[in-house]
Amino acid sequence: MSQGKFKYFPLVLSAPSGGGKTVVRSGLLKLSKKFAFSITCTTRAKRPGEADGRDYFFVTAEQFGKLRREGKLLEWAVVHGKYYGTPVKSVMTVLNKGRIPVMTIDVKGARSVKRLFPEAVTVFLLPPDLKTLVRRLRGRGEAPGGMKLRLKTARAELREAPKFDYLVINDKLNAAVREVAAIAELETRKTCRSMDRINKFSRQLAGRKP
Ligand code: ADP
Ligand code: 5GP
């Protein structure tokens, strides 16, 4: 998928469950209008406090299958036994508005996005240590069974971490948010993303009378 005509690029945040994707995303959205959430869809049940169209598009397995067959998902994965997928439209709408789609997706999804969108920037978030992760999962109300499953999945997720472009340690939340924002800012300065500016200047120079 070519992304050359867009000002920005998708910013993918992955982490083990409880690693801080949701809160870092909220922090980015508060920090700057440049960032926008690209809403994904899932077949899992809505949790208390979640809203359809805000946190996720909550769909049935049949609706998910139809979206997949019709090629409307940029990527999809099964996480903890439920289907999750990113609608192409969610990402394109944000890119077309000249903003950065923040994608909080699992490690398999991140790999698919990078394959389809080589310009995407991938960030792996990690709490400072396991004790902190367990404390945060408990604080979020994770039951012992859910905790066991999430920590088991975390092992496989960590094996994928070296494939990400950046690693951010999510110790103090504000610092982690600022680091991710700084990464996005630096990425916009890459020469490969700024060829239009360089070419414009070259054309001005070429047109200048001696
Ligand atoms: P994820 O979306 O990756 O599963 P969350 O963003 O839901 O993780 O974070 C898991 C829990 O840890 C939440 O209760 C959140 O408020 C808390 N948390 C995340 N990052 C921090 C942090 N830096 N400091 C304190 N609590 C945090
Ligand atoms: P939760 O059910 O806790 O909201 O999310 C479970 C996992 O699914 C998280 O790692 C989350 O980032 C991931 N996820 C959410 N939406 C998508 C998506 O569209 N695609 C993929 N691949 N993963 C997703």
Image (tube, rainbow, N blue to C red):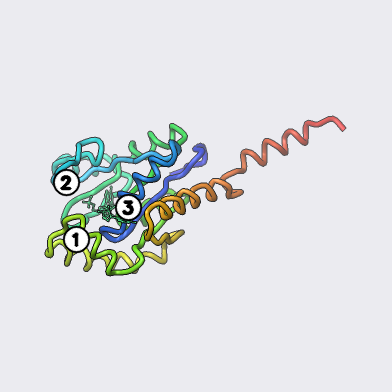
In this picture, is 68 found above or below 137? above
Mark 2 lies on residue: 43
Answer with left or right where residue 139 lies relative to residue 39. Answer: left
- Disc 2 Cβ-to-ligand 2 distance below 8 Å: no
In this picture, is 97 found above or below 125? above
Q: Which mark sits nearer the N-terminus, 2 or 3?
A: 3
Disc 2 + disc 3, Cβ < 8 Å: no
In the picture, the quarter occupied by the N terminus is top left
Alpha-carbon span between mark 1 and mark 2: 24 Å
Mark 3 lies on residue: 21
Amino acid type, label 2: Thr
Number of other residues with Cα within 10 Å of mark 3, as a class: few under 14, some 14 to 19, many 20 or more? many
Q: Quadrant of ligand 1?
A: bottom left
Amino acid type, label 3: Lys
Amino acid type, label 1: Arg
| Label 2: element kind | loop
- Disc 3 Cβ-to-ligand 1 distance below 8 Å: yes
Q: Which mark sits nearer the N-terminus, 1 or 3?
A: 3
Residue 69 % position (x, y): 23, 43
Number of other residues with Cα within 10 Å of mark 1, as a class: few under 14, some 14 to 19, many 20 or more? some
**Residue at 13% in and 46% down:** 45
Say which quarter of the image contains residue 61. Answer: top left
In the picture, the quarter occupied by the C terminus is top right
Residue 194 % position (x, y): 60, 43
Using the image as rendered, state which of residue 209 and residue 184 is in the foreground: 184
Q: Which mark is residue 80?
A: none
Mark 1 lies on residue: 138
Res 108 visible: no
Residue 166 % position (x, y): 45, 59
**Residue at 33% in and 36% down:** 89
Say which quarter of the image contains residue 80. Answer: bottom left
